[in-house]
Amino acid sequence: KQEVTQIPAALSVPEGENLVLNCSFTDSAIYNLQWFRQDPGKGLTSLLLIQSSQREQTSGRLNASLDKSSGRSTLYIAASQPGDSATYLCAVDSSYKLIFGSGTRLLVRP
Amino acid sequence: GAGVSQTPSNKVTEKGKYVELRCDPISGHTALYWYRQSLGQGPEFLIYFQGTGAADDSGLPNDRFFAVRPEGSVSTLKIQRTERGDSAVYLCASSLSQGHNLPNEQFFGPGTRLTVL
């Protein structure tokens, strides 16, 4: 059974800092991995999708990497801003349905 | 273009009542998914439709939960004899579902917050 773990559960950093969020999964037989952002009381916004054949994806200040064999993904956020404060969720797709981690709650202090 | 929409945004009901939650996917998306999210947790899969048929309903917790997508577009999640433990945010997502050789990016709606008193 696929299980997804995100570390840390919460993170508080000063504005401008570069940071890394971690995601691990137990079954490496995945089709893709997706990173989402969730603001309080809102739905999920897709940030990046990495296919199983890819190693990384970049969008603006965000870079996500995937090491399928070791069951790990990282989301790197460069030059963090207060507007980046949200919960970040990773999810793996192994059979169309997504299996989510519990998320990392990020606070970027001005 | 319009994203995934869900109605109502909030639903408060009493224990034992019946509720329906609606999802309008992105136009042209053949796949539709329902998830449930409890406070402080990631979403949990409930059911997945490919067109009109339920391709995977393994996440439905029991037979009080049922979902339909009669014309391959709008979907309704139906919960009978609601219980307090059903309180959660119900999220709907859709995707193009072009097969596993192409990205199956799922796009989520804002959710319906269900509260069972």
Image (cartoon, rainbow, N blue to C red):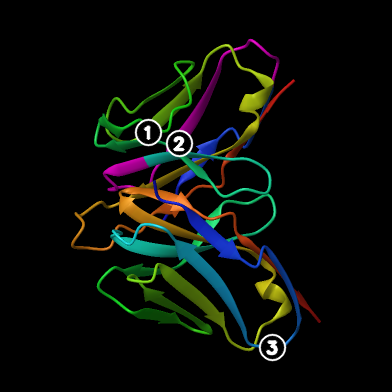
Q: Is residue B10 above or below residue A96?
A: above
Residue A50, x across and y down, in percent: 35, 70
Depth check, mark 3 against mark 2: the one in front is 3
The amino acid type, in three-letter code, at marker 2 is Cys
The amino acid type, in three-letter code, at marker 3 is Glu
Disc 2 target residue: B23
Look at the image and tell me whether residue B3 can be seen: no
**Is B51 situated left or right of B8 in this image?**
left
Q: Magenta segment range?
A: B13-32
Q: Is residue B15 above or below residue B1?
A: above
Tell me the quadrant of the picture where the N terminus of chain B can be found: bottom left
Residues at marks 2 and 1 touching, judged by CB atoms closer than 8 Å = yes
Q: Is residue A37 above or below residue A75?
A: above
Disc 1 target residue: B74
Chain to which mark 3 belongs: A
Residue B4, x across and y down, in percent: 45, 47
Depth check, mark 1 against mark 3: the one in front is 3
Upstream in the sequence, badge 2 or badge 1?
2
Look at the image and tell me whether residue A26 can be seen: yes
Chain to which mark 1 belongs: B
Separation of marks 2 and 1 at Cα, in angstroms:
6 Å
* Residue A90 among those drawn in magenta: no
Residue A13, x across and y down, in percent: 75, 80
User: In the image, which disc is placed on residue A17?
Assistant: 3
Q: Quadrant of residue B66?
A: top left
Residues at marks 3 and 2 touching, judged by CB atoms closer than 8 Å = no
Name the residue located 65 percent from the left edge and 59 percent from the top edge: A39
The amino acid type, in three-letter code, at marker 1 is Val
Q: Secondary structure at mark 2?
A: strand
Separation of marks 1 and 3 at Cα, in angstroms:
43 Å
